[in-house]
Amino acid sequence: MSLILGDADEQAIAPFVQAGTDQFEVLQRWAARRGDKVVKSEAGALRALLQVAVEALRDDVLDVAYSELAMVYNSDADQRGERRAARDRYAVRTDAAVPDTV
């Protein structure tokens, strides 16, 4: 797969692929923590940057899924409360309609 980068893209990634920059060092440490070999080439740095992006987006996807799950859970809790209130109202009406036999 080939990729053509525009000037802005090249400027954005340049510090991460140039040995000796703080960004390059941070990228190397990030890759090492994940078991990757030390980033030694521009291609290796680009692969590591791609993995950083994948992990970040994966985290965002999980955040969205957790938010949706929370909405469903909270919705179910609201519905349970509404059902409980309706059941209580029905019980009060039913108890009022039944004559006391004791």
Image (cartoon, rainbow, N blue to C red):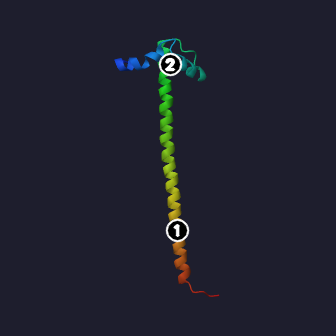
Q: Is residue 26 visible?
A: yes
Q: CA distance from mark 2 to mark 1?
A: 59 Å
Observer-nearest residue: 18 or 58?
18
Residue farthest to the left, as pictured: 6
User: In which quadrant is the C terminus drawn?
Assistant: bottom right
Q: Nearer the viewer, mark 2 or mark 1?
A: 2
Q: Which mark, by number, is residue 85?
A: 1
Contact check, label 2 and label 1, Cβ < 8 Å: no
Instruction: Residue at 52%, 52% (x, y): give it.
Output: 73
Question: Would you place residue 72 above or below residue 47 in this image?
Answer: below
Badge 2: few (under 14), some or many (20 or more) residues near its Cα, within 10 Å?
Answer: some
Whether residue 2 appears in this view of the structure is no
Q: Of helix, strand and loop, which one carries label 1? A: helix
- Indicate the position of residue 27 as horizontal and vertical percent values: 53, 20
| Mark 2, secondary structure of its residue | helix
Where does the image place residue 40, in percent across and percent down from the top left?
Answer: 53, 12
Residue at 46 percent across and 16 percent down: it is 15
Instruction: Provide residue 100's location: percent of width, then percent of height.
Output: 60, 86
Instruction: Identify which amino acid the numbered label 1 is placed on.
Output: Ala
For label 1, count other residues whose C-alpha is less than 10 Å away and answer few (under 14), some (14-19) or many (20+). few
Question: Is residue 78 positioned above or below 56 on the image?
Answer: below
| Residue 20: % across, % down | 52, 12
| Number of numbered discs overlaid on the protein picture | 2
Instruction: Give the mark, 2 or 1, whose residue is nearer the N terminus.
Output: 2
Residue beneath disc 2? 23
Q: Residue at x 55, y 75 (%)?
A: 91
The N terminus - image quarter = top left
Amino acid identity at mark 2? Gln
Q: Residue furthest right?
A: 102
Which residue is more in the foreground, 1 or 41?
Answer: 41
Is residue 13 positioned above or below 62 on the image?
above
